[in-house]
Amino acid sequence: MNRIRVFRGPKEGETTKENDPVTYDVKEGDERTAVRGFMSDLQGRLKAAQAAGKTAKLSLEIDEAIVQAFVIMVFDAGVRAFQMVYGPTANADISPIPLDPSKR
């Protein structure tokens, strides 16, 4: 089973890396449902950032064991969420990075 975790980075004064986390468990054959949940949550976070006048950045921490097709689905959902909130010509600031810090 794969997992999508969505969280925001620390605000000034916060010490924890993962704030307001939401986890989506991805079962084989049910990937689309998890990606839809991820996209919906991400849109809400992007709208909140836009309302606060902040620029949003998305980092995708990806385990090497995840199937490439699933990585593309999650990346595409992130791009579409940015475009739905900021407009069709928005430049989505998305950084896919390895989950293992030693491989970054």
Image (spheres, grey):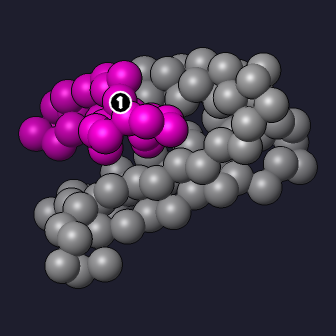
Residue 76 percent location from the top left of the image: 56, 49
From this view, report whether residue 24 is shown above or below residue 62. Answer: above
Does 86 sit above or below residue 96? above
Q: Is residue 52 left or right of residue 40?
A: right
**Which quadrant holds residue 15?**
top left
The extreme front residue here reads 13
What residue sits right under mark 1 in the picture? 19
Vertical order, 27 against 91 (above or below):
above
**Image quadrant assignment for residue 1:** top left
- From the top left corner, tell me how far across and down residue 41 is, in percent: 49, 21
Taking 14 as reference, is 83 left or right?
right
* Residue 19 lies in the magenta-colored region: yes
Q: Which residues are magenta?
A: 1-28
As drawn, which residue projects farthest toward the left?
A: 1
Give the side of residue 54 with respect to residue 31, left or right.
Answer: right
x then y, percent, for residue 100: 18, 68
